Image (spheres, grey):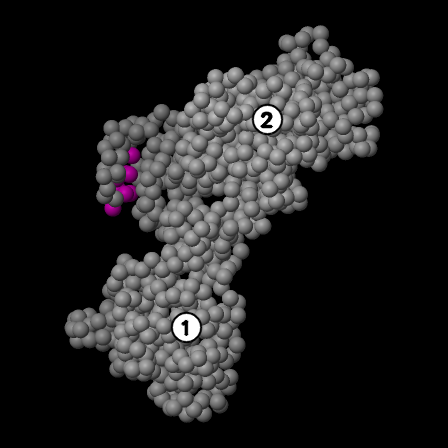
Amino acid sequence: MMKILKVQTLRGPNYWSIRHQKLIVMQLDLGELTEKRSDEIPDFYQGLIEVFSSLNSDRWDGFLKQLQEGLFLEKIVTQVALELQSLTEMPVEFSYIHSISTPGVYQVIFEYLDEKAGRYAARAAVRLCQSLIDRGYYPNSEFEQDLRDLRELRLEGTLGPSTEAIVKEAEARGIPWMQLSTRAMTQLGYGANQKRIQATQSDRTSILGIELACDKEATKEILQKHGIPVPRGLKIRYFDELEAAIEQVGGFPVVIKPLDGNHGRGATININSCQEAEAAFDTAIAMSKLKEVIVERYHGGRDHRVLVVNGKVVAVAERVPAHVVGDGRSTLEELIETANRDSRRGKGHNNVMTRIELDRSSFELLRKQRCTLETILREGEICYLKATANLSTGGMAIERTEEIHPDNIWLAERAARIIGLDIAGIDIVTPDISRPLSEVNGVVIEVNAAPGFRMHVCPSQGKSRNVAAPVLDMLFPPGTKPRIPIVAITGTNGKTTTTRLIAHILKQTQRTVGYTTTDGIYVDDYLVEAGDNTGPQSARLILQDPTVEVAVLETARGGILRSGLGFDVCDVGIVLNVTGDHLGIDGIDTIEDMAALKSVVAETVLPHGYAVLNADDPLVAAMSKRTKAQVAYFSMNPHNQLVQSHIRQGGLAAVYENGYLSILKADKTLRIKQAIDVPLTLGGLAPFMIANALAASLAAFTQGVALEDIRQALTTFRASVSQTPGRMNLFNLGSYHALVDYAHNPASYQALGSFVCNWSGECIGVVGAPGDRRDEDFIALGRLSARIFDRLVVKEDDDTRGRRRGEVANLICQGIEREKPDCYYESILNETTAIDIALDEATQGSLVVILPEKVGRTLDLIEARHPQSES
């Protein structure tokens, strides 16, 4: 039986695809069905054909041919997940199958449009295929329920038509966007350059303008004072004021509507009797939160919506109330059913038109027209089902932009400015929009904040208008940038230190820097959230912050695998190194797999940006072939052949030469600083820190940071508790020193050893490692520890990550014994006890190197022994 082990949702550039960013990754265990082909399963082929009998496409036909010849189940499940989505108006195509080191377990990867629907499709595909295997069929009722559920999930996740139009225009312009969890807002752009919208309200929309537009009577009053024709009207609160109000506006016909209404809710038009007026008052007062209604003179004519964006008319639509046209045969009820079967109609605002639903006012309108649901209309005869022309009640829209008279354009643009709205819907009633209102007794009946775009983008008749374009033009005028610079850092070791150093360098440019690290999210010097924050969610938090002017994002392996990157593109992508850490997890089984994963950062860099790559690491250097960006190399070897060739071709690099950190550009060598004068390098004794400083300096240089600012930053940045907690923190404890570092894999142990070997006294190591590594990794750490240290204390993390207590320590001890049988070591599993014993036993002039699970706890232990002891 197939078993789903894990389902992940990717939302950005990822290991499987840079272009296809919305992917479902399902880890599927086929069990005894491994290597089982479809042609070996009785009735499977016929059963699948019957389930998907409605499908007819070249893709499906090709798949069926392969299925008949014999396909493995992992491929079938993937295809079924795609087709389930396509059948429910979510066309998707991309898929991929990856087998991992565990026999019978596969990564099933496929595209989605709505993530909840995608996850549902994954489960439904497995359920459907398992049923075909077990029973030879999948019940039609269950299949239909799957399709209903998927359609419902699609509708729940779909953006409103106005927001969708703006988002699509933003995508066409390369403007990033994200939905915010608060009040259905959408963010366009990143950081300090972002703009926010809520449907068609923008962060430029005046609250005074919104409040004025919501007060229909005040709107008419101010428009009238400015010479814009409006219906006579007044507001009332009580029923006994109704009769006098009708007389004051000139008698019947009248309109009665809520003072604070919208979308035509609670409005009744063309009222011609006291009885109708009483019913209309009850409807309007019930809909009004303010418990006030407007009574105004009714003006006959056609209902038009004029859309004004940034002071300019951009579209005009005539709105026609919901109606049906007779055919001489069908009853009114049958005509309504036929109209609702139109594929353009649906529930809510997500279709071109909305389904026609009858209510009390509809039956009252039918009564006026002397009709019932059983009435058979003559051919061509029109019966109106709604009094108001709103699309949300089943109305239709006819495109009239090219017909509006220039005088009416002028009036509409003035009205929007008078009310104070950047995006406004001006409702005009006139017999002929192509003639001035003054000639035909036309009037402006309302000015609406947050007008819907659906009638303009998808009119029932006429061509579509790109009304989102002027909105984006307003929010991002020519010359403005929607993005902020993004620097992304990945690699096996050195990410946090390099991230913090780059942030420190960029602060010299007087910009607000937001950055994410393994120990927290920061904006400038302020900690926003503590903890390991190197995934996409943390990156998005920085990119959503309107104070951040440049983002520096540590980007770890786990986040890329779980969710993809938290950004679509970056300006600088740094890959420090690739080593065999975390192998055997989530399908990353080889160091080449790990390199491909890390290269996602380099591949996401914009063409005019820079991929900053380690020329001393062949796996990293090879990433230059996978990126479309410019490449800049850093190297500890000034004679590195790749670097020299790159420079001869006009490239950019940073090298460690003659004791200096230097930039190589064309035929120039720009010396930044001597390593011994860079505190981070511990007097030039820590080569891996020199490499980190080279990468950071080079990244800053590509972004136009002046050399003097880079020098200043390097001089003022130290491997200290305050600036790099847990990264080469050296403490003077009087007769001996202690060093705290987060080294936890073979490569970081080796890098640490390059510093320790320069220490003149005895070196004592307190070593351990996270439990989610392979057995051979722990043994390798034991061997390295025996080479680096004179004495060892082996401890374990509190969180063994699924290992038995003592298992990790035993494996490390095996490595020690294999490398140096006479090495003195002791195994003390409790980390605090192990640290205390190592410090207690430290000899004169010795160095105690502590590689802790919890840095903060270790720093507290050292502080308690010797306050203010940091070197």
Which residue is at a point 47% across and 33% down the rendered structure image?
Answer: 610
- In the rendered image, the quadrant that contains the C terminus is top right
Q: Secondary structure at mark 2?
A: strand
Q: Name which residue lies at 30% across and 37% down.
A: 136
Residue at image position (56%, 27%) is 670
At 80% from the left and 33% from the top, the residue drawn is 868
Q: Which mark is residue 497?
A: none
Comparing 709 with 61, the one in front is: 709
Q: Residue 784: x, y in percent?
A: 63, 15
Q: What residue would you read off at disc 2?
A: 671
Amino acid type, mark 1: Arg
- Residue segment shown in magenta: 43-54
Q: Nearer the viewer, residue 529 or 703?
A: 703
Tell which tag, 1 or 2, sits nearer the viewer: 2
Q: Quadrant of residue 325?
A: bottom left
Regarding residue 525, the answer to whether it shows in the image is yes
Residues tagged 1 and 2 counted as in contact (Cβ below 8 A): no
Q: Which residue is mark 1?
A: 414
Is residue 486 found left or right of 817 in the rendered image?
left
**Label 2 crowd (10 A; few <14 / some 14-19 / many >=20):** some
Could you say where residue 643 lies in the image, as x and y percent from the top left?
49, 21
Which amino acid is tagged 2? Arg
Indicate the position of residue 470 as horizontal and vertical percent values: 39, 59
User: First in sequence: mark 1 or mark 2?
Assistant: 1
